[in-house]
Image (cartoon, grey):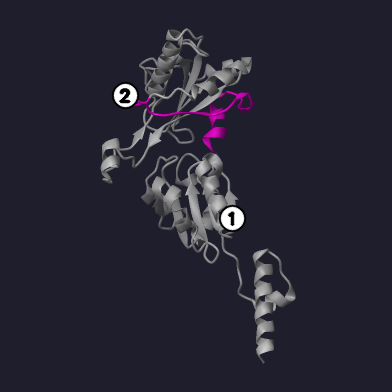
Amino acid sequence: MEVALRRRKSELGAAFSRARRGLSSPSSQLLLPTLVLKMLYLIGLGLGDAEDITVKGLEIVKKCNRVYLEAYTSILSVEKERLEQFYGRPLIVADRQTVEQEAEQIIKDADVSDIAFLVVGDPFGATTHSDLILRAVKMGVPYRIIHNASILSAVGCCGLQLYNFGEVASIVFWTRTWKPESFFDRVKANRQNGLHTLCLLDLQIKELSLENLIKGRKIYEPPRFMTVNQAAQQLLEIVQNQRARGEEPAITEETMCVGLARVGSEEQKIAAGTLQQMATVDLGGPLHSLIITGNLHPLEVEMLKLFPMPEDGS
């Protein structure tokens, strides 16, 4: 009897292992008729509003047991409540601390219940989400990616050809004592190769001031979103610093740039002009991006004429 029980237990274990690998057989179906693998879904939401999610993504969201909304690498132009109404599901907001320090909690139980992790744009638009996948694999949790539009592709709306872009650069807010210029190396390399540079501009959500961080107080600063004119002002300062050091800057005040705001939404705004002009332009609310152009194709030049600088600066 004991031998028979051990054999039965071994058969069940083998059938479960086959099912976990996505295999099936008559015996496994007989032994485990209700065994259905669950998984972690990373779902892109697009760039505009609640309706930008794909049909496939929406169907998955509606069936998931838990749905997280990543809320620090980017934002949508609509409130969380509007998303919940459209998706028909409550959303758990996942801030920086949740995603980077409590990833196991997000992944927890995803092998026995479907869990969705919603990302503005495309799931692979930030390295943090690759880390989430690696953790899931390490924990033995299956995953699936549902792609969507991201700023990396939608930026073509300004008329610059995507294959003429080089490496992406990120511009962060400067402080009085911290003014990094390292990102400018990418701008320089792209310009040397005749390529455009897409600059992703800083956003700070649920950030602690240095004082509150030192004192261990969870008092968060108001959200901040870098604008095109703020980024341009920092770039102009870098140009001046390089000249003061006797260096030849890769760009000048007259370099053609493109400012973009709220790409993908009905309030999308685009303006093409010199770096100096970008330092005073007002493109309204977030999110903003800035392009520093390289060599321009005649077709790109014609397309940029569709987006002149506003006469009143806004």
State the image coordinates of residue 103 (x, y, percent, origin top left): 47, 53
Magenta run includes residue 45: no
Q: Quadrant of the N terminus?
A: bottom right
State the image coordinates of residue 39 (x, y, percent, origin top left): 56, 60
Residues shaded magenta: 150-178
Please name the residue shown 39% across and 27% down the image: 227
Amino acid type of the residue that numbered disc 1 sits on in the rendered structure: Val
- The 10 Å Cα crowd at callout 1, few under 14, some 14 to 19, many 20 or more, is few
Q: Quadrant of residue 191?
A: top right
Residue denoted by label 1: 137
Q: Secondary structure at mark 1?
A: helix
Residue 74 appears in the figure: yes
Please name the residue shown 47% across and 15% down the image: 273
Up/down of 130 relative to 154, above or below = below
Residue denoted by label 2: 176
Residue 295 appears in the figure: no
State the image coordinates of residue 147 (x, y, percent, origin top left): 58, 45
State the image coordinates of residue 237 (x, y, percent, origin top left): 40, 15
Q: Quadrant of the C terminus?
A: top left
Up/down of 18 relative to 180, above or below = below
The residue closer to the viewer here, 230 or 155, is 230
Up/down of 6 relative to 261, above or below = below
